[in-house]
Amino acid sequence: MSLLHSYCPIFIILLGLCSTNIALSDIPDNKRVSFGGSIAPLYTTHISDMLPPKPMSICCQRFTKGNGLSLDLSVFAQYFINHQQSLQGSFGYRDISATMTSDQRIIVNQKLDSGFVTSTLTTDLSLIYLQLLHSYAPIHRMELSIGFTLGINASKNYSFKEELLSDSLTFDNSTRFRNVSFGALAGINPRYFGGIIGLAYSIPFFSKHLFVKPTIQYTYGLRPLQFGTNWYAHSLLFGLHWEYKPFGEINRPVVIENPPLIDVQIEKPRIEIKSKTNKAKNIYQYIYEYPVLDDITDNIIDDCHAQYVISDDCSEDHGSCLYRSILDTLSRRSRENPEEMISLGYSSKTKNDSVRIQSCLQAHLFDFTKIEYVPKFSYPITAEVEYSILNHKLTNPFVVIKQDTIYSQASLSFICIGNTKDSIQWGIYDSDIDSVIIKGKSHTNQEITVNTLPMAFKRGKIRCIIIHDGKRELIETVMTIDDSISMFQDSLPVETGVLFAFDSDSLSKKYKNQMLQFRGKLRESDSLIIEAFTDLSGDFSYNSDLAARRANRVSTLFSGFHCEIILSPLKKRNAGLLEHQRAYNRIVTITRKNAIKR
């Protein structure tokens, strides 16, 4: 109970610190957690005032201090309470071994010779520990920590010896050594308890998710290492922790300030705006058209509840993110065109399967009340294709726009006109949020230039507080920075494509008309790259021939233009394994070279 009473105030202080400001902030939940680990050097100091511990039976020499250099290995997880406070739990292994010495002049043998004897106690102590820290960040990426550690002794071995310092003397055993022993220390306290203070700073390591974290941490031992002795171990750790933030770094909020109270307000403006450079945007749009598969196959029905994980960046997988599931794609199109019925063409043999297709469409958020079934007698029906989407608005190619944008920073110059020797405090306030975004000090009649206005800044006020004869006068004026936009948009796609049926080089009427419209908009200076793909159903030789036939079929539509043909029978446009994803690999793309080299 005495131990509990001794440490109770410490627990109360730590709990008080951890409960301070535990108000949740506007941090997204997926950014609150990070984790990491470290292998760090450790310097341990041992403080004592004791005789050699048992089982060494030496009378009178006392150990007072010792030290050791070793390692600490740990893993940790950190939870951010708000932008400044976090809780961190660590689990690890710590070596707290040390060497302790004591020198004493004593009688060393039966001849009554006296000499200096050095007693050396070498301990092999280590801990498996659990550590809890409460951290406070006074500045971005810096953490001040306080907490405690609780450890279980993993090893408790020792070695002990007495050595004569004089070469001319010996003990009764005719050597300079005696009482040499080693083994397990008796009476070792099974639990280690200590208080912790620390300092750390996070540095991004070639990524917005991975950080190297220089850390210094001091642990003060609060419990004796051995029952009945005054023997404590403290440690100083300095090393590099590694921290991984799976959802990126937390952005700290901007501090909003209100304008100070003013003694005297002057209504007549005395601020002169000298110049303001508008924010400039240079936007060049690239347009890509990706064809839409309009057939619903057995594979899609069988896998209509499957989950597909594909990158959200279309540029990384050539538009495949638009084809995560063809049903998801068409569902999105249906929601964009709420007035459209979903017309499904069917053959007579598959009409009785309408319940199955209706259930699958509902699973992909289709409104089943908007589904209508249309006999498809005039269309050839293959064994693989049972249903087809007939609505043109739902199957038109996707248009994907990518933008290259260049911004120039806004700047502002102004003068606060007043008495020559008056000092001023100035600020630029954003009217949308009614708070200061930048401020400073100067003198009246001196030009003030600001080149660090935020890009989102649109309109606001310039306020100057003139300090004259001990009083403050407020003057202000309204100002607006308008966007100056230069947009270059080429309405003709940089890249488009056509799809082919399985093992076919026949170009459908739909795609032929689409390519002729594309050709009609080309400039005489344009040249084309025609790249043909196949799925991986056949061998390389056969697929190369099939890709060549498909490329030639498309190139005949662009006679008169320079066409570079690339055959890519082994290059995937879509990495999926389902039928509609494999079908997207049966594509020929047409790319305008002049659009790339602008």
Image: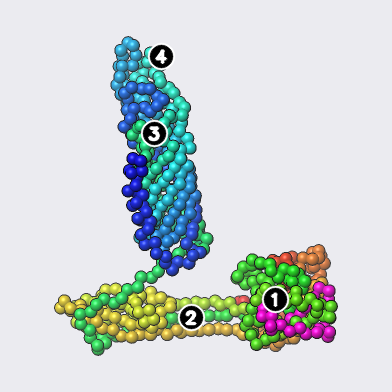
User: Which quadrant does the C terminus fall into?
Assistant: bottom right
Q: Secondary structure at mark 1?
A: helix
Q: In the rendered image, is residue 495 in sight?
A: no
Amino acid carrying mark 3 in the image:
Gln
The spot of residue 511 in percent (x, y) is 75, 82
Amino acid carrying mark 2 in the image:
Lys
The residue wearing badge 2 is 281
* Comes first in the chain, label 2 or label 3: 3
Q: Secondary structure at mark 4?
A: loop
How far is mark 1 from mark 3, CA to CA?
72 Å
Q: Of discs 4 and 2, which sits in the foreground? A: 4
Q: Secondary structure at mark 2?
A: strand
* Comes first in the chain, label 4 or label 1: 4
* Comes first in the chain, label 4 or label 2: 4
Is 450 above or below relative to 98?
below
How far is mark 4 from mark 2, CA to CA?
92 Å
Q: Of discs 2 and 3, which sits in the foreground? A: 3
The residue wearing badge 3 is 226
Picture residue at 39% right of the left edge, 48% below the top: 148
- The answer to whether mark 4 and mark 3 are in CB contact below 8 A is no
Is 152 above or below relative to 179?
below
Q: Which mark is residue 361?
A: 1
Whether residue 595 appears in magenta in the rendering, the answer is no
* Comes first in the chain, label 1 or label 2: 2
Report the magenta residues as a range. Answer: 366-389
Extreme residue toward the front, this view: 1
The residue wearing badge 4 is 173
How far is mark 1 from mark 2, CA to CA?
43 Å
